[in-house]
Image (cartoon, helix red, strand yellow):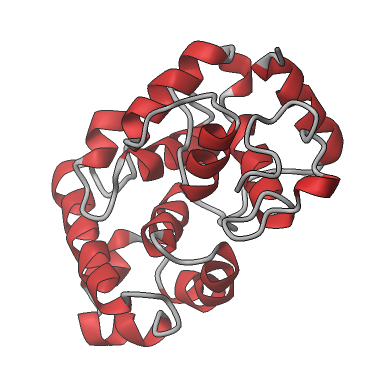
């Protein structure tokens, strides 16, 4: 029976350049990008954020603006009006509770509007270099289930299974590899099992 760490090594060999996918230059800009990324492609987010970042360098810039103006920068993003409200509320909390700085603590991050555990993990890991868990996105959910690394459906339970399987040194890179694999091979519909590097060990090969 294949071991998950052996399968992970195969993915490393297949996708040596896999890395975090949202572009940013400051923790605040990563916060904005991750709020926008919910149910939206990273390509769309990365296209929208250069102008957004140029206009809003600090949470005070957002609060001095209007929700209508903010929406104008993100109209290409799914659910942009709801996300604009999340950003306004998150910026108000940053100024009010955290000295206008994005906190690095997970509990404080998830207290911000529009920030769930996945988003908080992404900010912790990529803005502050703090790794306390695994980012669980749709690619991670799908591929971890297909490989039988987990039988869970809830993202937090899936994360618990993954951190139990893999050493902490792999937690940050794991979702990058699974995202690359999910985009290029193990797609949601009609996965390319015939050319998958894990076809010899995956219990779902040819069955999806």
Q: Quadrant of residue 107?
A: top left
* Residue at 54%, 47% in the rendered image: 139
Decide if residue 47 is in sight here.
yes
Q: Position of residue 132 (x, y in %)?
A: 43, 22
Q: Position of residue 86 (x, y in %)?
A: 23, 63
Q: Nearer the viewer, residue 202 or 117?
A: 202
Q: Which quadrant holds the N terminus? A: top right
Q: Nearer the viewer, residue 71 or 6?
A: 6
In screen coordinates, is 107 left or right of 24?
A: left
Decide if residue 66 is in sight here.
no
Q: Nearer the viewer, residue 190 or 175?
A: 190
Q: Position of residue 58 (x, y in %)?
A: 36, 61
* Residue at 31%, 75% in the rendered image: 79
In screen coordinates, is 57 left or right of 205?
A: left
Q: Is residue 56 above or below residue 65?
A: above
Q: Is residue 121 above or below residue 45?
A: above
């Amino acid at each position: 029976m294949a071991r998950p760490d052996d399968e992970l090594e195969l993915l490393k060999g297949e996708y040596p350049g896999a890395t975090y996918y949202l572009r940013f230059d400051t923790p605040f800009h990563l916060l904005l990008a991750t709020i926008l990324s919910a149910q939206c492609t990273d390509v769309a987010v990365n296209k929208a954020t250069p102008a957004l970042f140029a206009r809003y360098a600090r949470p005070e810039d957002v609060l001095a603006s209007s929700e209508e103006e903010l929406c104008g920068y993100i109209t290409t993003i799914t659910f942009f009006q709801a996300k604009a409200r999340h950003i306004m509320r998150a910026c108000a909390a940053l100024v009010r509770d955290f000295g206008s700085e994005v906190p690095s603590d997970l509990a404080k991050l998830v207290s911000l509007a529009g920030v769930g555990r996945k988003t908080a993990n992404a900010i912790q890991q990529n803005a502050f270099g703090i790794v306390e868990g695994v980012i669980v996105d749709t690619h991670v959910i799908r591929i971890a289930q297909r490989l039988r690394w987990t039988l869970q459906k809830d993202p937090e339970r899936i994360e618990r299974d993954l951190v139990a399987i893999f050493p902490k040194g792999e937690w940050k890179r794991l979702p990058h590899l699974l995202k690359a694999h999910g985009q290029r091979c193990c797609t949601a519909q009609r996965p390319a099992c015939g050319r998958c590097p894990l076809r010899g060990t995956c219990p779902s090969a040819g069955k999806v």
